[in-house]
Image: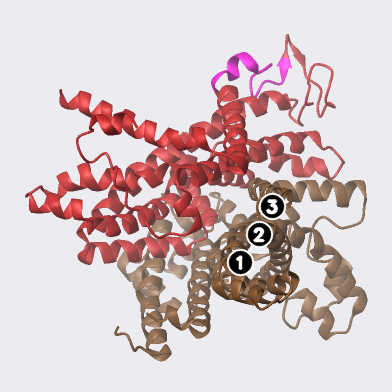
Amino acid sequence: MGQGSSLKQYALTRLGLIVPMVFILLTIVFLLMRVAPGNPVDAALGGHAPQAEINRITHELGYDKPLYVQYGDYLWNVVRGNFGTTISDRRSVGSIILVNGAATLELTFFAMLVAMTVGVLVGLLAGRFRDSPIDAGGRLFGIVVYATPVFFLGLLAQLVFGVWLGWLPTSDQASPLTQALLQTHTNIFFVDAIIDRNWSALWDVTKHLILPAATLGIVYGGVFIRLIRVNVIRTLKEDYIEAARARGITERHVVYRHAFRNALVPVVTVIGLQLALLLGGAVLTETTFNWPGIGHYLVLYIENRDYAAVQGIIVVFALVVVLVSVLIDFVNAFIDPRVRY
Amino acid sequence: MTTAAVRLQRRTVGLRRALGPIAQARGFARGMLWAGSGLTLLFVVLALFAPVLSPYAFDQYQSNGQRFGQLAHPGHGHILGTTVQSTDVLSRIVWGAQTELEVVGLALAFGLVIGVPLGLVSGYFGGVLDRGAVLFMDAMFAFPPLLLAIIIAFLLGGSVSSGVLVAALAITITYIPQYFRVVRNHVISVREEPYVEAARALGAKPLTILRRYVFFNVVQNVPVIATLNAADAVLTLTALGFIGYGVQPTQGAEWGYDVSRAVSDAASGIWWTGLFPGLAIVLLVTGLTLLGEGLNETINPVLRRRVIRRVDFAAPSLEPSSEILEP
């Protein structure tokens, strides 16, 4: 690409690169799932199903075809948006994504809010007061938070706020009553409760959300602390900050108006880059808090050795990560013309 | 001087050059280095002397024919209490240190042995091979690392009996793309340096250039990455253990597994089975991170502030002169 390339051209190139990437992803997942020894149907049915039943389902799902035919079918299905059917409970992966994915979306969204709040606050303070005790404290906090496994923090949160203080529930997305009464519009309970104007349900959902979202968010916030601190330090050295100071603008105004805003721009990129990390953390958080998200189900399906389910969910995870990273690139290219190389 | 002696001398030069800035480190960086080394060393000692330091075996639930109490409070012969299976919490932590360090050591070794040469070759030769490798590694990057590790551990679990090996391989696979990327990008910039050009002009074979000139310049970044990765690897290993993959309960003590068992204890207010192994994870990972960050800031302040210059003029690619030996 030449120098005068436009945003459109950049977008096209970037989009074009998705195709081989996704193809490689799909192939890796397919091969990984076929490397495992044994008949996937037999494994998913617990290894005790009668042979005739196994044969029937194997044939029905096409596992008796040659590998290259299966591979072709699989690619074609994915292209049509069909990610397969689980073997153990015969759900379509698409519905798992819709129902359980919504729970994961709810959790990760609020976790991200917590992470941004923690990260921006601590990061800004540490960067602003560089090399002071505040900075040292902030950095140490960032490191310790990063070093804390999300499931351990979750366990502590359950102990303190759930068991000892008894303030908050420690598992599930909502109480059984709320789950029974709430209409499902989006499968995101928080949104559903608002749509229904069901405030007691909203309160219940929020209470269930606080511990998991805070746990994941605080751990994930460690990543932002580090990044924002470095950005603030770098921005405060820029010429325009010096110029603002020279114009006699108060230090407070310089810092909050001129430095912080610019320091936060690169954070957008990192959110995209760290999405994979967040999803990994979500798997653990969901398992700890018995949150019915897609990660929790993935772990359950792995335990049941349900290859079809695992394959479908992993593909969707990877697709989301790839697509979001492209989206973030677009946003960046839109904001910052230097990116459009 | 024999080649072996030269090589040894080169290594000591490198070591001295690497250790020099550490002695001069000041402020927060110095604190990080000391605290990090201290914590890491503590766990290394625990791991090495586990048989001496640990009161009981990691899966021992009785002594002299008498079964330990179930979920006994900390104190009375079990300083940190006992678990549901009547095993001693302290013993599991001490033996766990051994498991963690074994797995992480193996994973790092595998990752380096595979990732670094791949990055070297891919970056130096470029071309179609390089493009393909980059695309492949980028695709691997798109997987949430923990998920990839879980799947690998799950797939290998059936055929490889050693849990330590399974966990190490699962972790390795998530780190190879990272080593590959760092090394490859660095090689690409080093490839155009005058001294590499000179070697090429002298008629050195590509392999020789890679081994003698490129490798030593690129590999300097690796200790920092490796230390930080070690911290990350402990987290991945404990996460695997928490979900129930990797090191199996019969094969060794694993902190993540212990915490997973403690989740059900927590509902009845039992805190010691989860708190102590969890703290062990936090301390070890903090130690490794502090060490890595401290190294990063002291050895390579340029890298931290702004990535502009990575040319190292005193690189040990030349015959070591007395000047370099006695700085």
Residue underneath mark 2: A127
| SS class, disc 2 | helix
- Disc 2 crowd rating (10 Å Cα; few below 14, some 14-19, many 20+) is many
The magenta segment is B48-62
Q: Residue B306, how many percent across, how many down?
A: 47, 59
**What color was chain A assigned in the picture?**
brown
Residue underneath mark 3: A135
| SS class, disc 3 | helix
Mark 3: amino acid: Asp
**What color was chain B assigned in the picture?**
red
Residue at (40, 65) in percent of width and height:
B139
Mark 1: amino acid: Leu
- Whether the residues at callouts 2 and 3 have beta carbons within 8 Å, the answer is yes
Q: Is residue A309 depicted above or below B98 in this figure?
A: below
Q: Chain of mark 2?
A: A
Residue at (35, 49) in percent of width and height:
B115
